[in-house]
Image (cartoon, rainbow, N blue to C red):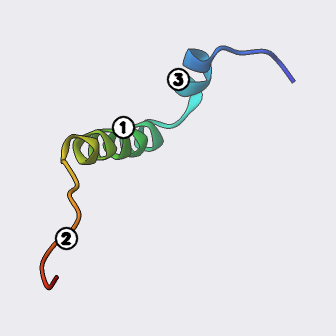
């Protein structure tokens, strides 16, 4: 097996895979920005 950098490995992936991963990362970043508070209704 050859030693390649993370960037080289990323560039070897098909564009469609890179786009899908980018979409997941952006979605996850958005969810981290949304505060989560405990539900207090019904208490």
Q: Is residue 31 above or below residue 13?
A: below
x%, y% of residue 30? 22, 43
Q: Which residue is mark 3?
A: 11
Q: Quadrant of the C terminus?
A: bottom left
Q: Residue at x 59, y 17 (%)?
A: 8
Determine whether label 3 and label 2 are within 8 Å by CB: no
Q: Nearer the viewer, residue 37 or 10?
A: 37
Q: Which residue is mark 2?
A: 39
x%, y% of residue 41? 12, 79
Would you call the spot at circle 3 few (<14 residues within 10 Å), some (14-19), or many (20 or more)?
few
Disc 2 to disc 1, C-alpha distance: 31 Å
Disc 3 to disc 1, C-alpha distance: 13 Å
Q: Nearer the viewer, residue 40 or 26?
A: 40
Looking at the rendered image, the disc whose residue lies closer to the viewer, 2 or 1, is 2
Q: Which residue is mark 1?
A: 22
- Residue 23: which quarter of the image? top left
Residue at the extreme bottom of the image, as rendered: 42
Looking at the rendered image, the disc whose residue lies closer to the viewer, 3 or 1, is 1
Q: Residue at x 65, y 14 (%)?
A: 5
Looking at the rendered image, the disc whose residue lies closer to the viewer, 3 or 2, is 2
x%, y% of residue 19? 36, 39
Q: Is residue 9 left or right of residue 1?
A: left
Q: Is residue 19 left or right of residue 30?
A: right
Q: Is residue 20 left or right of residue 5?
A: left
Q: Residue at x 44, y 36 (%)?
A: 18
Q: Nearer the viewer, residue 31 or 12?
A: 31
Q: Is residue 7 above or below residue 20?
A: above
Q: Residue at x 14, y 85 (%)?
A: 42
x%, y% of residue 31? 25, 48
Would you call the spot at circle 2 few (<14 residues within 10 Å), some (14-19), or many (20 or more)?
few
Disc 3 to disc 2, C-alpha distance: 44 Å
């Amino acid at each position: 097996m050859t030693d390649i950098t993370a960037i080289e490995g990323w560039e070897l992936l098909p564009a469609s895979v890179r786009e899908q991963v980018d979409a997941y990362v952006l979605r996850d970043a958005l969810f981290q920005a949304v505060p989560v508070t405990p539900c207090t209704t019904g208490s």
